[in-house]
Image (cartoon, helix red, strand yellow):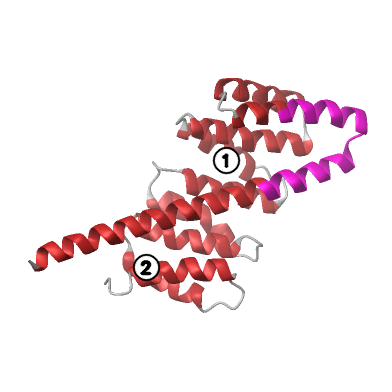
Amino acid sequence: MADIFDEVSEELKHDQLIKALKKYSKLIIGFVLVITISIISYQTYIHLNKKKLDTISQQYLKALDNLEKKNYSNSKTLFQQNLQNHKDGYKMLSLFGLAEANFKVGNIDEMLVNYKTIYDDKSIDIYYRNLSRILSVIKDNSSSFEKQKLLLEPILNSPSKLQLLASELEVMLFIKFNKIREAKKALNVLLKRSDITFEQKNRLELINKIYKNEQ
């Protein structure tokens, strides 16, 4: 009988974790897209003349529209054209868009290459390079724990606006690879930080509750 209750408990724990992961991923991806599009579009507007901006923005928005309508093949073609024909902000945005299109059709290896192109490019602002690292880890369902953890290290070990997000992702990464002891340790450190947001604290406390008695 005890075994049955243990099994049910594990199933409930698993369901809770899946729900937390889904909510976590949607929040991050939504935040990333909104911030990236708004900031880069504004910066691009400043650096490009109005006529050229209109042409570039129309091409980018057309690619984005195809992506939203699930016309992934068309969106990939348009994003590729933008990469070949333009520089600065819209080129980077097109790389983010191309990575998302590849993710949607299951081309994970190509997606990882797209993000790597961003975070390896030292001409790109460090914020967006770190952003590409975070998205790469969130959407990577094939790489080893060591490879994904290594990708987060530059964000975790240096001052960054995305450090808290990377720290939370590190906890989820430990859990994903069943490293519960390491997850609890990282979780406790993160919960003691005074700069975590209310939403983050709620998510972390939920995870802490689920794994409180795990060894």
As drawn, the residue found furthest toward the left would be: 1
Q: Dot 1: what SS?
A: helix
| 2 or 1: tag closer to the N-terminus | 1
Indicate left or right for 87 with 178 as reference: right
Q: Quadrant of the C terminus?
A: bottom left
When the figure is inspected, residue 178 is found, relative to residue 143, above or below; the finding is below
Q: Residue at x 57, y 65 (%)?
A: 164
How many residues crowd around disc 1 within 10 Å: few (fewer than 14), some, or many (20 or more)? Answer: some
Instruction: Magenta stretch: give its range.
Output: 34-61
Q: Residue at x 40, y 43 (%)?
A: 141
Q: Quadrant of residue 92?
A: top right
Q: Residue at x 10, y 68 (%)?
A: 2
x then y, percent, for residue 52 = 88, 28
x then y, percent, for residue 172 = 43, 59
Label 1 sits on residue: 116
Indicate left or right for 167 with 171 as reference: right
Determine the CA span between mark 2 and mark 1. 27 Å
Q: Amino acid at mark 1?
A: Lys
Q: Dot 2: what SS?
A: helix
Q: Is residue 163 visible?
A: yes
Q: Which one is in front, 139 or 159?
A: 139
Label 2 sits on residue: 182
x then y, percent, for residue 151 = 51, 52
Q: Which one is in front, 171 or 74?
A: 74
Q: Amino acid at mark 2?
A: Glu
How many residues crowd around disc 2 within 10 Å: few (fewer than 14), some, or many (20 or more)? Answer: some
Indicate left or right for 198 with 45 as reference: left
Q: Is residue 123 visible?
A: no
Asked if the magenta segment contains residue 49, the reply would be yes
